[in-house]
Structure formats: C-alpha cells, structure tokens
Image: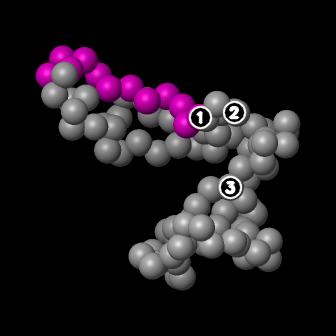
Amino acid sequence: VPALEHYCEGKLPLVCTMYASSECYFGVNLKPLCDPNDVAFTLLPNMGYYEFIPLGHNGTLLMNFDENEHVPNDKLVDLVNVKLGCFYELVITTFAGM
C-alpha cells in the first residue's frame, strides 16, 4: 500500500472492490473507498464452499505453524462455525471442483 500511495500522491482514491483468484470471486469490499489498511471483505457464500483452518486458539495467532503440514478434515471449520476474533486460513472449493 505505501508504494501505491506514493504514486497517487493522495490525489486518487485507492479502491479495492473484490477478493478474487483466477478460479472465482470470494468476497466483496462493501466500503471500497475506505483506507486500504482498513479493507474488510464480505465472503460471497454462493461462489464456492468455504472451510477454514484454525491458526490459533481462543483468538491468539500461533506463529509456529508449518505451511506444508497436512490438515486432517476433522480440523477444518465450516463457515457457520467460524468464531469472531480468531485467525484462520481460508480453504475454498469452487463449484468446478478447483
């Protein structure tokens, strides 16, 4: 964000409207003109099946997790069971199976 702010010199708004990949759109920014450091995306539940890998316990982020670790299916959390204030890694299965 600092590099972008350098080039726009405060004269142009930095707008981020969506959270996406090459496979699908995941979420939308409901406040696209907010400060880029405050962006929060609302997930679109009709775009895929969302699961979450917990990255901590009771709202604390574990800093010693292994990115290559295999996560058993019983540790995945469904969208309806996500707890506010906790940290997760997002896992998405699109309707195309990707």
Residues at circles 1 and 2 in contact by the CB criterion of under 8 Å = yes
Amino acid type of the residue that numbered disc 3 sits on in the rendered structure: Val
View extreme (bottom): residue: 57
Residue 93: percent from the left, percent from the top?
78, 48
Residue positioned 76% across, 75% down in the render = 72
* SS at badge 1: strand
First of labels 3, 2 by sequence position = 2
**Can you tell which quarter of the image residue 80 is in?**
bottom right
| Side (left or right) of 80 relative to 86 | right
CA gap between label 1 and label 2 equals 6 Å
Residue positioned 69% across, 33% down in the render = 24
The residue tagged 3 is 91
| Side (left or right) of 47 relative to 36 | right
Residue range corresponding to the magenta coloring: 8-20
Residue 28 lies, with reference to residue 51, above or below; the image says above
* SS at badge 2: loop
The residue tagged 2 is 24
CA gap between label 3 and label 1 equals 13 Å
Residue positioned 55% across, 37% down in the render = 19
The residue tagged 1 is 20
Amino acid type of the residue that numbered disc 1 sits on in the rendered structure: Ala
Q: Please say whether residue 21 is one of the residues in the magenta stretch.
A: no
